[in-house]
Amino acid sequence: MERQIQKILNRRLTLEGAGVKLKRVLGNDDDSTLDPFLLLDHFGSDNPQDYIKGFPWHPHRGMETVTYMWTGEVEHGDSMGNKGVIKSGDVQWMTAGSGIIHQEMPQKYDGLMQGFQLWINLPAKKKMVDPKYRGIVKEQIPMVQKDGVKIKVIAGKVDGTQGPIRDLAIDIEYFDVKLASGKTFEHTTTKEDTVFAYIVEGSVEVQGKTITQGQCVVFGKGDFAKIDSKNISRFLFVSGEPLNEPVAWRGPIVMNTQEELDQAFEELDAGTFIKTKNSLYPKQGIEVL
């Protein structure tokens, strides 16, 4: 059974970090939170003043962040001692688990700097696992090409080609899809999974309805999703297994109960938030709005 359109989301402008201008595709309200996905932000500008202040040291617990750079560079450092630069085409998949403190600082770029950050909820049994950092360079991301369709496979599998992100907390698929004009992307999905596509360039058609650049189409349940191109188009296609668990969420910390959430912030204030040894982040000045 083909998946039908459940709803269409329009991104909205917002400010995050130390004043980074970005477009929020989903997240922060019941209508645009898609279990197990909490948030998707599209950041990008050709004006460094829109992003250069970045995202200084801040905590996460109970979830994962996936940063995918299209163009530009982001410097990263965290409480596990990881540091480096996420460059054009690279992916950073970070499991916060029991707690991590990190910073993400976009570097000045000549031209349009843009990328995406997806937040994925962790199941209750894995919320307090040890944090993990995975940096994937663009050369490690395979591409499947067929009949005017190009698919970068970040996580999941397409025609037997497996993405480099494996051993996931829950089953996730994450593809970067480019369609030539008049071509079709069709992908078999697990029937109960949450599935959406965010249109970054061009426009597409789903069941006769046009979805334009900047819109996100959320699919209903079904066995496969089908997207037709009206012109040259590019979109992120994401699917994942719903957790069907209660969510207690404040800022960058996502737990199952209010008590767990309160405890996380108490530990943050007391300096006991990090469960693994750390070396990089400052002991003072961590603020959570």
Image (cartoon, rainbow, N blue to C red):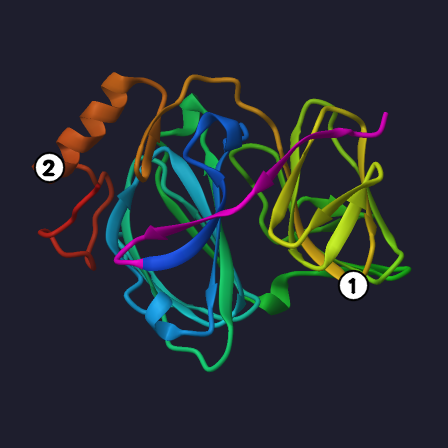
SS label for mark 1: loop
Position of residue 282 relative to residue 248, above or below, is below
Magenta region? 1-19
Q: Nearer the viewer, residue 254 or 274?
A: 254
Q: Is residue 186 left or right of residue 214?
A: right
What count of labels does the image hold? 2
Position of residue 84 relative to residue 258, above or below, is below
Question: Which corner quadrant of the image does residue 234 belong to?
Answer: bottom right
Q: Residues within 10 Å of mark 1 (few under 14, many from 20)?
A: some
Can I make out residue 36 in this image? no
Residue drawn at (43%, 30%), measured in percent from left and top? 29
Residue drawn at (20%, 24%), measured in percent from left and top? 262
| Residue annotated with mark 2 | 269
Q: Is residue 210 left or right of residue 12?
A: right
SS label for mark 2: helix
Question: Which corner quadrant of the image does residue 62 belong to?
Answer: top left
Q: Position of residue 176 (x, y in %)?
A: 67, 55
Which of the marked residues, 1 or 2, is nearer the chain's N terminus? 1
**Amino acid tagged 2:** Asp
Whether residue 3 is in magenta: the answer is: yes
| Residue annotated with mark 1 | 232
Q: Position of residue 222 (x, y in %)?
A: 78, 25
